[in-house]
Protein backbone atom coordinates (compact mmCIF):
# COMPACT_ATOMS: atom_id res chain seq x y z
CA UNK A 1 0.00 0.00 0.00
CA UNK A 2 2.34 2.67 1.17
CA UNK A 3 5.72 1.07 1.31
CA UNK A 4 7.46 4.31 0.40
CA UNK A 5 5.85 6.29 3.24
CA UNK A 6 7.10 5.72 6.77
CA UNK A 7 4.02 5.75 8.96
CA UNK A 8 4.43 6.71 12.63
CA UNK A 9 0.84 6.18 13.74
CA UNK A 10 -2.33 4.71 12.27
CA UNK A 11 -5.88 5.43 13.39
CA UNK A 12 -8.99 3.67 12.15
CA UNK A 13 -11.88 6.10 11.73
CA UNK A 14 -14.15 3.75 9.82
CA UNK A 15 -17.70 4.33 10.96
CA UNK A 16 -16.94 7.99 11.78
CA UNK A 17 -18.63 10.82 9.90
CA UNK A 18 -17.85 14.51 9.49
CA UNK A 19 -16.92 16.60 11.38
CA UNK A 20 -15.62 13.95 13.80
CA UNK A 21 -13.41 12.48 11.10
CA UNK A 22 -11.41 15.71 11.17
CA UNK A 23 -11.80 16.32 14.91
CA UNK A 24 -10.32 12.90 15.70
CA UNK A 25 -7.61 13.13 13.02
CA UNK A 26 -6.59 16.52 14.37
CA UNK A 27 -6.47 15.28 17.98
CA UNK A 28 -4.26 12.38 16.91
CA UNK A 29 -1.91 14.63 14.94
CA UNK A 30 -1.62 17.12 17.83
CA UNK A 31 0.04 14.43 19.93
CA UNK A 32 2.65 13.67 17.28
CA UNK A 33 5.97 15.36 16.58
CA UNK A 34 6.77 17.58 13.63
CA UNK A 35 7.68 15.53 10.56
CA UNK A 36 5.85 12.41 11.71
CA UNK A 37 3.24 10.77 9.48
CA UNK A 38 -0.29 9.85 10.49
CA UNK A 39 -2.22 7.26 8.49
CA UNK A 40 -6.00 7.54 8.78
CA UNK A 41 -8.55 4.97 7.60
CA UNK A 42 -11.95 6.23 6.46
CA UNK A 43 -15.08 4.69 4.99
CA UNK A 44 -17.02 7.98 4.81
CA UNK A 45 -16.61 9.45 1.33
CA UNK A 46 -17.10 13.15 2.26
CA UNK A 47 -14.18 12.77 4.66
CA UNK A 48 -11.85 12.17 1.71
CA UNK A 49 -12.67 15.63 0.41
CA UNK A 50 -13.00 17.43 3.73
CA UNK A 51 -10.24 16.09 5.95
CA UNK A 52 -7.33 16.66 3.52
CA UNK A 53 -8.62 20.16 2.78
CA UNK A 54 -8.90 20.98 6.50
CA UNK A 55 -5.46 19.52 7.18
CA UNK A 56 -3.91 21.67 4.45
CA UNK A 57 -5.76 24.71 5.82
CA UNK A 58 -4.05 24.12 9.15
CA UNK A 59 -0.64 23.91 7.49
CA UNK A 60 -0.25 20.12 7.49
CA UNK A 61 0.97 18.16 4.47
CA UNK A 62 -1.29 15.55 2.88
CA UNK A 63 1.17 13.11 1.32
CA UNK A 64 -1.22 10.76 -0.41
CA UNK A 65 -4.71 9.28 -0.49
CA UNK A 66 -5.01 5.57 -1.36
CA UNK A 67 -8.34 3.94 -2.14
CA UNK A 68 -8.05 0.35 -0.97
CA UNK A 69 -11.64 -0.80 -1.32
CA UNK A 70 -15.05 0.20 -2.55
CA UNK A 71 -15.48 2.22 0.62
CA UNK A 72 -12.06 2.34 2.18
CA UNK A 73 -9.45 5.02 1.96
CA UNK A 74 -6.07 5.58 3.60
CA UNK A 75 -5.00 9.20 4.03
CA UNK A 76 -1.38 9.98 4.88
CA UNK A 77 -0.72 13.29 6.62
CA UNK A 78 2.65 14.66 7.69
CA UNK A 79 2.72 17.02 10.66
CA UNK A 80 4.33 20.22 9.36
CA UNK A 81 2.92 22.73 11.81
CA UNK A 82 2.38 22.86 15.55
CA UNK A 83 -0.51 25.26 15.81
CA UNK A 84 -2.17 28.40 14.53
CA UNK A 85 -1.88 31.48 16.74
CA UNK B 1 -4.68 14.81 27.54
CA UNK B 2 -7.02 12.05 26.41
CA UNK B 3 -10.52 13.34 25.92
CA UNK B 4 -13.46 11.12 26.76
CA UNK B 5 -15.87 10.27 23.96
CA UNK B 6 -18.35 12.73 25.47
CA UNK B 7 -15.72 15.46 25.57
CA UNK B 8 -14.81 14.94 21.91
CA UNK B 9 -18.47 15.49 21.03
CA UNK B 10 -19.09 18.30 23.52
CA UNK B 11 -16.03 20.33 22.52
CA UNK B 12 -15.81 19.33 18.84
CA UNK B 13 -16.67 22.82 17.59
CA UNK B 14 -13.83 24.25 19.65
CA UNK B 15 -11.37 21.54 18.60
CA UNK B 16 -12.17 22.28 14.96
CA UNK B 17 -10.93 25.85 15.32
CA UNK B 18 -7.25 26.14 14.30
CA UNK B 19 -6.66 28.61 17.16
CA UNK B 20 -8.11 26.25 19.77
CA UNK B 21 -7.68 22.58 18.90
CA UNK B 22 -7.31 19.84 21.48
CA UNK B 23 -4.53 21.56 23.36
CA UNK B 24 -6.52 24.80 23.56
CA UNK B 25 -9.50 22.91 24.90
CA UNK B 26 -7.23 21.34 27.47
CA UNK B 27 -6.16 24.82 28.61
CA UNK B 28 -9.82 25.76 29.00
CA UNK B 29 -10.51 22.62 31.05
CA UNK B 30 -7.58 23.45 33.33
CA UNK B 31 -8.48 27.12 33.75
CA UNK B 32 -9.67 28.64 37.02
CA UNK B 33 -11.84 31.74 36.71
CA UNK B 34 -13.64 33.60 39.47
CA UNK B 35 -16.76 35.71 38.96
CA UNK B 36 -17.35 38.71 41.17
CA UNK B 37 -21.13 38.64 41.26
CA UNK B 38 -23.63 36.18 39.83
CA UNK B 39 -26.00 38.85 38.56
CA UNK B 40 -26.66 40.41 35.18
CA UNK B 41 -23.05 40.14 33.98
CA UNK B 42 -21.88 37.13 35.97
CA UNK B 43 -24.77 34.99 34.73
CA UNK B 44 -23.90 35.02 31.01
CA UNK B 45 -20.17 34.98 31.74
CA UNK B 46 -20.56 31.88 33.87
CA UNK B 47 -22.98 30.29 31.43
CA UNK B 48 -20.57 30.50 28.50
CA UNK B 49 -17.51 29.63 30.57
CA UNK B 50 -19.34 26.54 31.82
CA UNK B 51 -20.39 25.64 28.28
CA UNK B 52 -16.81 26.11 27.13
CA UNK B 53 -15.60 23.73 29.83
CA UNK B 54 -13.69 26.06 32.16
CA UNK B 55 -12.74 23.52 34.80
CA UNK B 56 -13.09 25.65 37.92
CA UNK B 57 -15.47 28.59 38.19
CA UNK B 58 -15.61 30.51 41.44
CA UNK B 59 -18.78 32.47 42.18
CA UNK B 60 -18.61 35.26 44.73
CA UNK B 61 -22.05 36.50 45.77
CA UNK B 62 -23.80 36.81 49.10
CA UNK B 63 -27.19 37.85 47.77
CA UNK B 64 -30.32 35.76 47.30
CA UNK B 65 -32.37 35.46 44.14
CA UNK B 66 -35.23 37.95 43.91
CA UNK B 67 -38.06 38.16 41.39
CA UNK B 68 -36.74 41.50 40.14
CA UNK B 69 -33.43 39.83 39.17
CA UNK B 70 -34.97 37.47 36.64
CA UNK B 71 -35.46 40.06 33.89
CA UNK B 72 -31.71 39.80 33.24
CA UNK B 73 -29.91 37.37 35.58
CA UNK B 74 -30.16 34.25 33.45
CA UNK B 75 -28.29 31.91 35.79
CA UNK B 76 -31.36 31.93 38.04
CA UNK B 77 -35.03 31.10 37.58
CA UNK B 78 -38.39 31.50 39.24
CA UNK B 79 -38.10 28.35 41.33
CA UNK B 80 -34.87 29.67 42.88
CA UNK B 81 -36.32 32.81 44.43
CA UNK B 82 -34.91 33.10 47.93
CA UNK B 83 -32.02 30.74 47.16
CA UNK B 84 -28.43 31.95 47.46
CA UNK B 85 -27.30 33.29 44.08
CA UNK B 86 -24.01 31.43 44.38
CA UNK B 87 -25.83 28.13 44.93
CA UNK B 88 -28.31 28.87 42.15
CA UNK B 89 -25.51 29.68 39.70
CA UNK B 90 -23.63 26.55 40.74
CA UNK B 91 -26.67 24.43 39.99
CA UNK B 92 -27.17 26.06 36.58
CA UNK B 93 -23.55 25.87 35.46
CA UNK B 94 -22.83 22.35 36.73
CA UNK B 95 -26.06 21.05 35.19
CA UNK B 96 -24.99 22.47 31.84
CA UNK B 97 -21.59 20.78 32.02
CA UNK B 98 -20.42 18.14 34.48
CA UNK B 99 -16.80 18.89 33.58
CA UNK B 100 -17.17 22.14 35.50
CA UNK B 101 -16.65 22.49 39.22
CA UNK B 102 -18.25 25.60 40.69
CA UNK B 103 -16.84 26.85 43.97
CA UNK B 104 -19.21 29.15 45.86
CA UNK B 105 -18.01 32.06 47.98
CA UNK B 106 -21.07 33.39 49.80
CA UNK B 107 -19.35 36.45 51.13
CA UNK B 108 -19.38 40.15 50.52
CA UNK B 109 -15.95 41.12 49.23
CA UNK B 110 -13.88 43.34 51.46
CA UNK B 111 -10.24 44.18 52.02
CA UNK B 112 -10.21 41.38 54.59
CA UNK B 113 -11.27 38.46 52.41
CA UNK B 114 -10.61 39.34 48.75
CA UNK B 115 -6.95 38.26 48.58
CA UNK B 116 -7.69 34.87 50.10
CA UNK B 117 -10.53 34.25 47.68
CA UNK B 118 -8.99 35.33 44.39
CA UNK B 119 -5.43 34.09 44.92
CA UNK B 120 -6.24 30.58 43.70
CA UNK B 121 -7.73 31.71 40.37
CA UNK B 122 -6.01 32.64 37.09
CA UNK B 123 -8.52 35.21 35.89
CA UNK B 124 -10.96 37.48 37.72
CA UNK B 125 -14.19 38.69 36.10
CA UNK B 126 -15.75 41.80 37.56
CA UNK B 127 -19.51 41.81 37.24
CA UNK B 128 -20.14 43.88 40.34
CA UNK B 129 -22.76 46.58 40.50
CA UNK B 130 -21.05 49.11 42.74
CA UNK B 131 -17.95 51.26 42.80
CA UNK B 132 -16.49 50.17 46.16
CA UNK B 133 -16.27 46.57 44.90
CA UNK B 134 -15.04 47.64 41.45
CA UNK B 135 -12.09 49.54 42.96
CA UNK B 136 -11.39 46.85 45.54
CA UNK B 137 -11.25 44.18 42.82
CA UNK B 138 -9.05 46.34 40.59
CA UNK B 139 -6.56 47.09 43.38
CA UNK B 140 -6.43 43.46 44.55
CA UNK B 141 -5.84 42.22 40.99
CA UNK B 142 -3.05 44.76 40.47
CA UNK B 143 -1.41 43.71 43.75
CA UNK B 144 -1.68 39.99 42.93
CA UNK B 145 -0.99 40.52 39.18
CA UNK B 146 -4.20 38.73 38.20
CA UNK B 147 -5.76 39.26 34.80
CA UNK B 148 -9.02 41.14 35.32
CA UNK B 149 -11.84 41.33 32.82
CA UNK B 150 -13.81 44.35 33.93
CA UNK B 151 -17.21 45.47 32.68
CA UNK B 152 -20.10 47.69 33.61
CA UNK B 153 -23.59 48.35 32.31
CA UNK B 154 -25.93 51.27 32.65
CA UNK B 155 -29.39 51.63 31.08
CA UNK B 156 -28.73 50.88 27.37
CA UNK B 157 -24.94 51.01 27.52
CA UNK B 158 -22.05 48.84 28.47
CA UNK B 159 -18.28 48.94 28.65
CA UNK B 160 -15.57 46.31 28.81
CA UNK B 161 -11.84 46.52 29.51
CA UNK B 162 -9.26 43.79 30.06
CA UNK B 163 -6.66 44.58 32.68
CA UNK B 164 -3.28 42.85 32.54
CA UNK B 165 -1.45 44.30 35.56
CA UNK B 166 2.05 45.46 34.72
CA UNK B 167 1.31 45.19 31.01
CA UNK B 168 -1.36 47.80 30.42
CA UNK B 169 -3.59 50.24 32.24
CA UNK B 170 -5.76 49.35 35.22
CA UNK B 171 -9.17 50.71 36.10
CA UNK B 172 -7.61 53.50 38.16
CA UNK B 173 -5.54 54.62 35.16
CA UNK B 174 -8.91 55.32 33.56
CA UNK B 175 -10.84 56.64 36.57
CA UNK B 176 -8.44 57.39 39.40
CA UNK B 177 -10.96 57.52 42.23
CA UNK B 178 -14.58 56.46 42.64
CA UNK B 179 -17.25 59.08 42.08
CA UNK B 180 -18.65 60.55 45.29
CA UNK B 181 -21.40 58.46 46.86
CA UNK B 182 -24.79 59.47 45.52
CA UNK B 183 -23.46 61.19 42.43
CA UNK B 184 -23.96 58.23 40.12
CA UNK B 185 -27.32 56.47 40.24
CA UNK B 186 -27.09 52.72 40.77
CA UNK B 187 -28.87 50.27 38.49
CA UNK B 188 -31.59 50.05 41.08
CA UNK B 189 -32.42 53.68 40.42
CA UNK B 190 -31.38 53.97 36.78
CA UNK B 191 -32.83 50.85 35.21
CA UNK B 192 -31.13 48.45 32.85
CA UNK B 193 -32.30 46.80 29.66
CA UNK B 194 -31.96 43.12 30.52
CA UNK B 195 -30.38 42.04 27.27
CA UNK B 196 -27.62 44.64 27.63
CA UNK B 197 -26.19 42.69 30.56
CA UNK B 198 -26.15 39.56 28.48
CA UNK B 199 -24.36 41.13 25.51
CA UNK B 200 -21.75 42.76 27.70
CA UNK B 201 -21.29 39.65 29.85
CA UNK B 202 -20.81 37.58 26.73
CA UNK B 203 -18.14 40.04 25.54
CA UNK B 204 -16.43 39.55 28.90
CA UNK B 205 -16.61 35.78 28.50
CA UNK B 206 -14.99 36.17 25.07
CA UNK B 207 -12.11 38.09 26.63
CA UNK B 208 -11.74 35.39 29.29
CA UNK B 209 -11.52 32.60 26.71
CA UNK B 210 -9.02 34.62 24.63
CA UNK B 211 -6.92 35.19 27.76
CA UNK B 212 -6.96 31.47 28.60
CA UNK B 213 -5.93 30.55 25.06
CA UNK B 214 -3.54 33.46 24.54
CA UNK B 215 -5.06 34.26 21.15
CA UNK B 216 -6.17 37.44 19.39
CA UNK B 217 -5.90 41.00 20.63
CA UNK B 218 -7.29 41.53 24.12
CA UNK B 219 -9.00 44.75 25.19
CA UNK B 220 -5.73 45.70 26.86
CA UNK B 221 -5.26 49.45 26.89
CA UNK B 222 -8.61 49.75 25.18
CA UNK B 223 -12.07 50.43 26.50
CA UNK B 224 -14.91 48.99 24.46
CA UNK B 225 -18.12 51.01 24.62
CA UNK B 226 -21.44 49.78 23.31
CA UNK B 227 -24.73 51.57 23.01
CA UNK B 228 -27.70 49.31 22.36
CA UNK B 229 -29.97 52.08 21.07
CA UNK B 230 -27.46 53.26 18.45
CA UNK B 231 -26.23 49.66 18.04
CA UNK B 232 -22.79 51.15 17.91
CA UNK B 233 -19.50 49.75 19.21
CA UNK B 234 -16.58 52.09 19.86
CA UNK B 235 -13.10 51.35 21.16
CA UNK B 236 -11.12 54.10 22.82
CA UNK B 237 -7.45 53.85 23.68
CA UNK B 238 -6.61 54.01 27.36
CA UNK B 239 -2.98 54.82 28.15
CA UNK B 240 -1.25 53.56 31.24
CA UNK B 241 -0.94 56.34 33.81
CA UNK B 242 2.57 56.58 35.22
CA UNK B 243 1.07 58.47 38.15
CA UNK B 244 -1.64 55.86 38.78
CA UNK B 245 -2.05 55.55 42.55
CA UNK B 246 -2.07 51.75 42.42
CA UNK B 247 -0.20 50.57 39.30
CA UNK B 248 1.96 53.64 38.59
CA UNK B 249 5.67 54.10 39.20
CA UNK B 250 5.20 55.34 42.74
CA UNK B 251 2.00 53.79 44.04
CA UNK B 252 0.37 55.54 46.98
CA UNK B 253 -2.23 52.82 47.45
CA UNK B 254 -0.38 49.90 48.98
CA UNK B 255 -3.22 48.57 51.11
CA UNK B 256 -6.74 47.72 50.03
CA UNK B 257 -9.45 50.30 50.68
CA UNK B 258 -13.00 49.60 51.78
CA UNK B 259 -14.71 52.57 50.18
CA UNK B 260 -18.06 51.29 51.27
CA UNK B 261 -17.41 52.05 54.90
CA UNK B 262 -15.97 55.39 53.96
CA UNK B 263 -19.01 56.21 51.82
CA UNK B 264 -21.53 55.10 54.41
CA UNK B 265 -19.76 57.14 57.07
CA UNK B 266 -19.93 60.21 54.89
CA UNK B 267 -23.67 59.80 54.46
Image: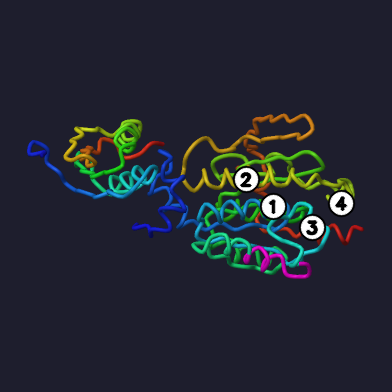
Kindly identify the residue that appears in the image at 64 percent across and 43 percent down: B170
Q: Tell me the CA gap for discs 1 and 3.
A: 14 Å
| Position of residue B258 measured from the top left corner of the image (x, y, whole percent) | 75, 60
Mark 1: few/some/many CA within 10 Å (<14, 14-19, 20+): many
Label 1 close to label 2 by CB (< 8 Å): yes
Q: Tell me the CA gap for discs 4 and 3.
A: 23 Å
Label 2 close to label 4 by CB (< 8 Å): no
Q: Which residue is mark 2?
A: B204
Q: Earlier in the sequence, mark 2 or mark 3?
A: 3
Residue B127, disc: 1
Q: Earlier in the sequence, mark 4 or mark 3?
A: 3
Q: Chain of mark 3?
A: B
Kindly identify the residue that appears in the image at 82 percent across and 46 percent down: B192
Q: Is residue B82 magenta?
A: yes
Q: Which residue is mark 4?
A: B181
Q: Tell me the CA gap for discs 1 and 2.
A: 9 Å
Looking at the rendered structure, the secondary structure element under dot 2 is: helix
Q: Are marks 1 and 3 on the same chain?
A: yes
Mark 4: few/some/many CA within 10 Å (<14, 14-19, 20+): some
Q: Quadrant of the N terminus of chain B?
A: bottom left
Q: Chain of mark 2?
A: B
Amino acid sequence: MADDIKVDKTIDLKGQVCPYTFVRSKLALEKMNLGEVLEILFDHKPAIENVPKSMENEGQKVLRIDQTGDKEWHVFVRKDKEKAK
Amino acid sequence: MDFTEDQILRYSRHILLPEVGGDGQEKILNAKVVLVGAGGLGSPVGYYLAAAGVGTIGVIDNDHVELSNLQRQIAHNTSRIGVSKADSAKETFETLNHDVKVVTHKERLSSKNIMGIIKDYDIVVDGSDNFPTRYLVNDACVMLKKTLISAAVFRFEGQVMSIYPGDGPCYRCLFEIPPPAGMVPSCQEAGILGVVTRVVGTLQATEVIKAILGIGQPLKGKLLLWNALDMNFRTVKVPRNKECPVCGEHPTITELIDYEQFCSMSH
